[in-house]
Image: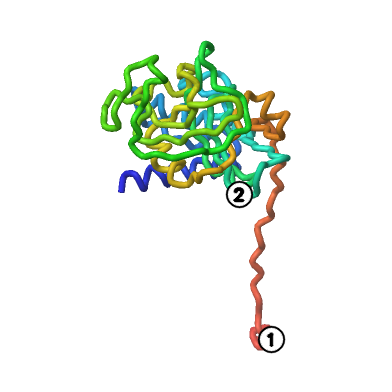
Amino acid sequence: MVKRLKRLNIFMLLLLLIFPVTVRGEGYIRPNNFMDKSGAEKVAEIKRFQALSNLMVTGGINDMTYKVLYGPNMVVKDVITNPPTSGEWIVINKTKKTLTYYNGTSPMYKFPVAIGSSATPTPSAKAKIANKHVNPAWGGMNGKYQPKAADDPNNPLGERWMGLSIPGHSGYGIHGTIKPGQIGQAVSNGCIRMFNYDIETFIFPRVKVGMPVWMGTDEELESWGVSQIVVEEAPQPVEAVQEPVEVETFQPAELLEF
């Protein structure tokens, strides 16, 4: 029941952020799931809010996050001019550190991710999902680290793995994490990490082998026809609505009575 409610909350937030409710005047607050949270849970929800808002994921209320949170004229837009398919596909934004799951040109989900560090960066590429595994073992990157069994709590892959087919590269994938506090950072060996709940509930069940996955910076994605932006639009003038005037009607017979 709790998972179903959380799943519904995330879905409703995406709808409200992409198709925001028009609210004018003082006291506007964009829908979010972090105002009533504290500690690590609050930070995680701020990261989700930033991903949903096409903001750079930091986990803190910076100036732009504050502006989107309290600005009724801030509009989240995904402009896709050249999708690889009319079906479902994924975009990893390395600048914002987000994963967006599209159906054609329409975003279905947006989540914060961790990407590769400067020493071991996530490659920019038009890739595809090569394989999927539940509760995967980890090989330790060809001897660089100690391998971890599937049920090892120290397995850095978490409970889900989606391998990527990338021209000229191998060993990369999208997976869960045992270090949720690092989501939104450039800290991995090149793979894309997600919150376990996000990948297990929303992404892994839908993904199919062969699905396109585009990975790049803001500039690279824009050159491929993918713009993920948040802009401030001028407020629309509110037209005065005249209330209907109730006119009393009389029957002809009533008019003859004195």
Residue kind at label 1, given as amino acid type: Pro
**Residue at (37% x, 31% y) in the render:** 36
Instruction: Please state if 36 lies on the left or on the right of 191 as rendered.
Output: left
Q: Which residue is mark 2?
A: 87
| Location of the C terminus (image quadrant) | bottom right
Seen at 49% across and 44% down, the residue is 207
Q: Residues within 10 Å of mark 2 (few under 14, many from 20)?
A: few
Residue 79 on image: x %, y %: 69, 38
User: Where 108 falls versus 51 (above or below)?
Assistant: below
> Where in the figure is residue 92, as x and y percent of width and height?
56, 30
Instruction: Let me know if residue 89 appears in the view.
Output: yes
Residue highlighted by disc 1: 252
What SS does tag 2 mark? loop
User: Which tag, 1 or 2, sits closer to the chain's start?
Assistant: 2
Percent of width and height locating residue 111: 49, 33
Image coordinates for residue 225, horizontal then vertical, percent: 71, 35
Name the image quarter holding residue 220: top right
